[in-house]
Image (cartoon, rainbow, N blue to C red):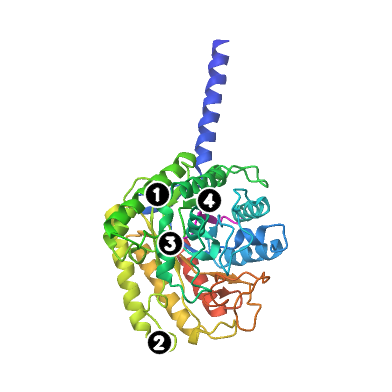
Amino acid sequence: MKTKFLKTTLIATLCFLFMACNAQKNYIKVDGTHFTLNNKTLHFVGTNFWYGAYLGADAEYGNRARLLRELDQLQKNGITNLRVVAASEESDYGLPLSPPFQYKNGTYNETLLKGLDFLLVEMGKRNLHAVMVLNNNWDWSGGMGQYVSWINNTPVIDPSVNKNQTWNDYLKSAGKFYELQQAQDIYRKYIKMIVNRTNTFSNKAYNNDPTIMSWELANEPRPSVDGDKDEKMKIFTKWVDETAGYIKLMAPKQLVTTGSEGSQGTLNSLEFTYQAHNTKNIDYVTFHMWPKNWAWYKAESPDMENAKKKTAAYFDEHLALAKKLNKPIVMEEFGFVRDGEKFSPDSPTTARDEYYIFVLELLKHSVETDGSLGGLNFWGWGGEGRAQQKDYRWKKGDMSFTADPYSEAQGLNSIYNTDKSTLKIISKYSKEIDKR
């Protein structure tokens, strides 16, 4: 009888250990400056696919058939990581992303949340991993500026449509987000809901789903530009640490990161970038790369060598910073315009292709040497989406999502499913890197 009891206990213990071990499989983890997946070093080529949940919604604006085709093509081209919008706010901006995940009255859009459920399930089937973006420094999804407007009961600063307002005016307003306790309470309430959500298709809790690689505090969060830089950076760093810690308590199996642009997003200071990531609650460093936006490249008088030189320098200094922190780093945004900054899918991509090769070679070199660059996500996947207006500008009622936010020309930075030369480059490098 005793022998039978011991045997039963041993079997139960082994089953528990097997289940516990199995439960940890397929989660992306961090080991020093490397990502790992199932005890193997991981590097990836990914894309920004912010509108994935919108396509996944069973609604007029959704298109599940297109979503499945997009995911199939991404998988075919070796893409394994998608950075997606997992939060948006009911917006007073003139060019809003609508409908939102979160309404002003504190209720949530269950139809859109089910679209996110659908997206995650279909990504899981294809071994794609998600970076879940929980807020936005910029206006196009509502974001921090909208939170400030809600709490202070003031009009939004909207330079996309109001030419009397500047982006510096906008940043001063949005930067108040970090110091408004009521805004933080609403933000955390949303975080708690989404991190603990149970997927209506898989019946799996989000915080127990290995499809989700990481939770990202926001798209390009920046410390306030209004006031003393050191003081504003202290406020920002505290917000990063405490918000990331809050998420980690609820999602210990998944990673957390900032969404930072790097020094361009921390008051042009690498030291501030270091401070923002120097907490145990942030698992890996992020940085972005925008040659045109940062005046490194002008399509009307192209100087590719200048763009490459400044890209390489920005790349090197951020990899060095990540090594100092002993954390992996991801270039989670980089984009480049078509030749002559045209928007038509038929326009050539000679310069873009050259720049993509340059950046992907940087990733390949890192993989072949120290490997601290864990991956990159190009901006962004336009796929089957196309501008619906002759001037390529989004208008209310347009529902053919591209990679470009509505404040930008539709086609500005989108990689379309017909961009054969660019897709050939992406596929070549992603498959080479995946083999290593």
Secondary element under disc 3, as helix, strand or loop, is helix
For the question of whether residue 345 can be seen, the reply is yes
Amino acid under disc 3 = Ser
The quarter in which the N terminus is drawn is top right
| Rendering quarter of residue 174 | bottom left
List x then y, in percent, for residue 132.
52, 54
Nearer-the-camera pick, 273 or 338: 273
CA distance for labels 4 and 3: 32 Å
The reply to whether dot 2 and dot 3 touch (C-beta < 8 Å) is no
**Nearer the viewer's eye, disc 2 or disc 3?**
3
Q: Residue at x 35, y 48 (%)?
A: 238
Q: Which mark is residue 212?
A: 4
Closer to the chain start, of discs 2 and 3, is 3
Amino acid under disc 2 = Pro
Amino acid under disc 1 = Val
Mark 4 crowdedness (10 Å alpha carbons): few <14, some 14-19, many ≥20: many
For the question of whether residue 221 can be seen, the reply is no
**Nearer the viewer's eye, disc 4 or disc 3?**
3
Q: Which mark is residue 80?
A: none
Whether residue 132 appears in magenta in the rendering, the answer is yes
List x then y, in percent, for residue 10.
52, 22
**Residue identifier under label 1:** 30
Nearer-the-camera pick, 335 or 154: 154
The reply to whether dot 1 and dot 2 touch (C-beta < 8 Å) is no
**Residue identifier under label 3:** 173
**Residue identifier under label 2:** 302
